[in-house]
Structures are given as C-alpha cells and as structure tokens.
Amino acid sequence: MAVSYKNRQVRVPSADAGATVLIPGRVYVKSVDWVNPSGVGGDTVVIQDASGNTMWDDVCSGTNYSNSKLIESWWANGFAVTTLARGTLMVTYG
C-alpha cells in the first residue's frame, strides 16, 4: 500500500515512511492516528516538519496498539513521517 490522500487526510503505511515531505508549505494538522495491530513494544513513530523539527512522536507498548491525538493548534511548515516502525499513520489536516 502506498501513501494516499483523501478527504484532507494522508495515510502513510510503514513501508513508505521516510524524509519525503508529504504536505509542503504551511499546513494545519488536526489529528494523528497510529494503528499498529502487529506492533511490539518499542516500535516508534516520528513526525517532523520540513526543517527536521520533531512535532510528534510515540512509542508502542505492545500488540494491537493504537494511539489517537486530537490537535487543535498545530501549524506546521510541511511535514514528513520520518520513522514508522509498523502499522499505518493517518494525519488529518485542514
């Protein structure tokens, strides 16, 4: 599965994580959802802005891990999912 964009949401599977900026320019990030059904403790995810500043990160605690974060005021100058050990990350933006 490749990175997909639909209804102002970008879905990033672990195989496609990397330094590529997914949304260039100024973007308002509303929420982040990490679904990691085959996760193991210690799996990590990192989102950085276009300048390489970490904006959000998380560490998986075990199998069937899921974490959602509603963000109300997160403006970013582009973003990239630089690390995604397993699972899929969904970022909703405005």
Image (cartoon, rainbow, N blue to C red):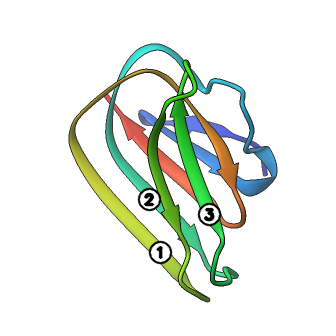
Distance from the alpha carbon under mark 2 to that under mark 1: 7 Å
Q: Total of numbered circles in the picture? A: 3
**Which residue carries the number 2 mark?**
33
The residue nearer to you, when weighing 7 against 55, is: 55
| 2 vs 3, front mark | 3
**Residue 43, above or below 29:** below
- Residue 5 vertical placement versus 23 (above, below): below
In the picture, the quarter occupied by the C terminus is top left
**Which one is nearer the viewer's eye here, 65 or 9?**
65
- Dot 2 or dot 3, earlier in sequence: 2
Identify the image quadrant of residue 88.
Answer: bottom right
Q: Earlier in the sequence, mark 1 or mark 3?
A: 3
**Is disc 2 placed on a helix, strand or loop?**
strand
Residue located beneath label 3 in the image: 44
Q: Position of residue 22 (x, y in %)?
A: 61, 27
Residue type indicated by callout 1:
Ser
x, y percentage for residue 1?
Answer: 79, 52
Residue 50: mark: none
Disc with the residue nearer the chain's start (2 vs 1): 2
| Residue type at tag 3 | Thr
User: Where residue 79 appears, x then y in whole percent?
Assistant: 52, 28
For the residues carrying marks 1 and 3, which lies nearer the camera in this image?
A: 3
Seen in the picture, residue 86 relative to 29 is either above or below; the reply is: below
- What residue is drawn where x is 68% and y is 83%? 40
Return the residue at label 1: 66
Circle 2 residues within 10 Å: few <14, some 14–19, many ≥20: some
Q: Distance between the Cα atoms at labels 2 and 3?
A: 13 Å
Is the C-beta separation of discs 2 and 1 under 8 Å? Answer: yes
